[in-house]
Image (cartoon, grey):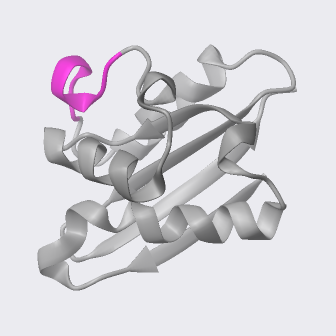
Amino acid sequence: SAFADAAVDPIDFPIAPAYAVPKILSESGLKKEDIAMWEINEAFSVVVLANIKMLGIDPQKVNINGGAVSLGHPIGMSGARIVVHMANALKPGQYGLAGICNGGGGASAILIQKL
């Protein structure tokens, strides 16, 4: 498991997760292909689309049961929602990576492995 933060200019906040994710992959020694499931908080649809493109990840592995646009964006607990969803959806031994941006230009990401 690992976590990382990153920051971009506030105007570019939707793409901030794409800067936190590579830090986690580098720290953990994992590759994008090792990640079974991605959760990218979807405050707006463009957030997920832009990060998929920038990270070059398989869209079939991202927000597999829908994102915040369909499931809800509970302000103040969106990060908890995506991590809990991922923890419940992963199979034992699989890795999942979640990322979330904030309106100030920052982002946080976390890598978990289901035991």
> Residue at 46% across / 22% down in the picture?
60
Can the viewer see residue 102? Answer: no
Residue 38 position (above or below residue 16):
above
Q: Position of residue 104 (x, y in %)?
A: 21, 76
Residue furthest bottom in the image: 9
Segment colored magenta:
66-73
The location of residue 41, given as percent across then percent down, is 33, 42
Residue 67 lies in the magenta-colored region = yes
Q: Quadrant of the C terminus?
A: top right
Q: Left of 64 or right of it: where is 15?
A: left
Query: Could you say which quadrant of the image residue 9 lies in?
Result: bottom left
Give how far across and how far down residue 4 sits, in percent: 59, 69
| Residue at 41% across, 27% down | 63
What count of labels does the image hold?
0
Q: Nearer the viewer, residue 34 or 113?
A: 34
Quarter occupied by residue 62: top left
> In the visual, does 61 lie left or right of 54?
right
Examine the image and state in which quarter residue 78 appears. top left
Residue 7 percent location from the top left of the image:
37, 81
Q: What residue do we see at 52% from left, 36% from top?
A: 38
Magenta stretch containing residue 34, yes or no? no
Q: Residue at x 47, y 63 (%)?
A: 108
Q: Give the answer, above or below, for where 7 lies relative to 94.
A: below
